[in-house]
Image (cartoon, rainbow, N blue to C red):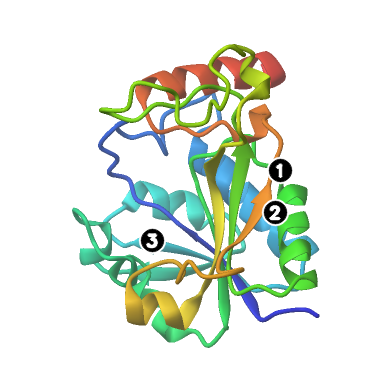
Amino acid sequence: MKKDIIIVGCCRERSTRCPDKMLRKLDDNTCLFDLYMKRLTELDEITSYKTIIALNKKDIRLMDIAKNYNIEIVERNDKSIGDYPTLGETHHYMENFNNEYMMWINASFPFLNPTTLIDIIGYFNSHIGYGLHCIKKMDNWFWKDGIYKPINVNNIKNVRSQDVENIYMSVQCCHILNRKFILENNIMWDYTENNPMLYKVEDSIEFLDIDTETDFLICKSVYNYLYG
């Protein structure tokens, strides 16, 4: 059953861990925000879902790029791009829409394929669930402060990382959220069964995420290797 979803993009110029990451060039012509707008445009063209990009009018450089694409621009207020807004404050503009669900797409994934996002929507539509979050399996040892044994190793004589107890890491490429719920409760999901559903992805360059300067340099190198 097709669920009532709106595809949502939003970002800001100010980034603390990797300054100006949206607009810094990956090559001579392309920045992260260019890739983001192209991804949203492709989703808008090949799906029947409404797609929007939410920006603050003070982010003039992002606005100038976004106006080159045929995606509806909705305005974010100043509080939504400030320090530590709540989830409801971040997505306050969703009060102007009536869709049951929103699929928020992270702008920091330069290699994320629109077909992957379409597959995720298809999975959400074909299963009983009230939200969705992506995860990937991590074959490694994991530790907690004050505990002197890996928390996911049952047999300390077996040092093979691929034999550890399954641990999954969040992949923040996108979330499917109940629009009304996040506005009223300031949390993504209620963390009960199927809220969120967990969608397993394979580890690949598609899920490289730019959060830090090191991440940016890695993605820039990969981008130039693939497309330079």
Disc 2 from disc 1: Cα separation: 7 Å
167, 67: nearer the viewer: 167
Mark 1 highlights which residue?
Answer: 113
Q: Looking at the picture, does residue 151 appear above or below residue 195?
A: above
Find residue 52 and report its image quarter.
bottom right
Q: Are marks 2 and 1 in contact (CB under 8 Å)?
A: yes
The answer to which of marks 2 and 3 sits earlier in the sequence is: 3
* Residue in the picture at 50% in, 46% down: 107
- Determine whether the residue tagged by mark 1 lies in a helix, strand or loop: loop
Quarter of the C terminus within the rendering: top right
Q: Point out the image quarter for the N terminus.
A: bottom right
Q: Specify the label residue 55 is tagged with.
A: 3
Q: Which residue was labeled with disc 2?
A: 117
Of 81 and 101, nearer the camera is: 101
The kind of secondary structure element at disc 2 is: helix
Q: CA distance from mark 3 to mark 1?
A: 22 Å
